[in-house]
Amino acid sequence: MRIDDLRPEDWQAAALIYEEGLDVGTFEYAVPSWEEWDAKYLAEPRLAARDDGGVLLGWATLGPVSRRACYRGVTENSIYVGRAARGHGVGRALLTELCRRADELGIWTIQAGILDGNDASVALHASCGFRVVGVRERLAQKRGAWRNVTLMERRGPDPPPAS
């Protein structure tokens, strides 16, 4: 397995992986278009995990939590691993590299909102230095049922003072 950059031409494969996670990892009901997805996330880092043959196994990226300048270093991560690749270290490799690149970019907080019942994602994030901040109870509905969201965060190094 190798980790490299997710490219626009990867979207078809990335969208299939996203679709596999609709009932586990997101409040979304449908896969967004490339244009919607592209507008939602930061330009970098956008990571792809590929097998030795170049097949996409999973992807990870960061999105801003706010467009306000004071929150420029606060992001929320998205990480999706294809069903067949789960449990093989793909998520950990992606999240480890995502955190490393976030540190290089001066991002000081990565948060993750994890749907209740996704214990594998909570464990993955904890293994990469995230801590539980709290549980947001009955945050939103999915398929008519209220869902709780575990809020986790990882604090990176403090950025240099603003000039």
Image (cartoon, rainbow, N blue to C red):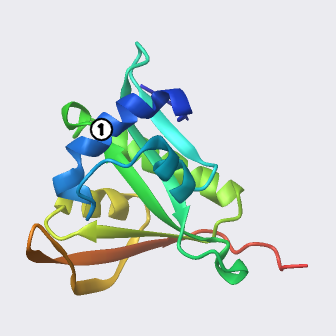
Q: Which quadrant of the structure image shows residue 53?
A: top left
Q: Position of residue 109 (x, y in %)?
A: 56, 72
In this view, which residue lies farthest toward the top? 53
Q: Residue at x 18, y 62 (%)?
A: 119
Q: Nearer the viewer, residue 69 or 51?
A: 69
Q: Nearer the viewer, residue 161 or 72?
A: 72
Q: Residues within 10 Å of mark 1 (few under 14, many from 20)?
A: many
Is residue 113 toward the left or the right of residue 47 in the image?
left
Q: Secondary structure at mark 1?
A: helix
Q: Which residue is mark 1?
A: 17
Q: Which quadrant of the structure image shows residue 138?
A: bottom left
Q: Residue at x 31, y 47 (%)?
A: 31
Q: Position of residue 67 (x, y in %)?
A: 63, 74
Q: Position of residue 69 (x, y in %)?
A: 72, 79
Is residue 89 at all visible to an observer of this figure?
no
Above or below residue 152? Residue 78 is above
Is residue 138 at all visible to an observer of this figure?
yes
Q: Amino acid at mark 1?
A: Ile
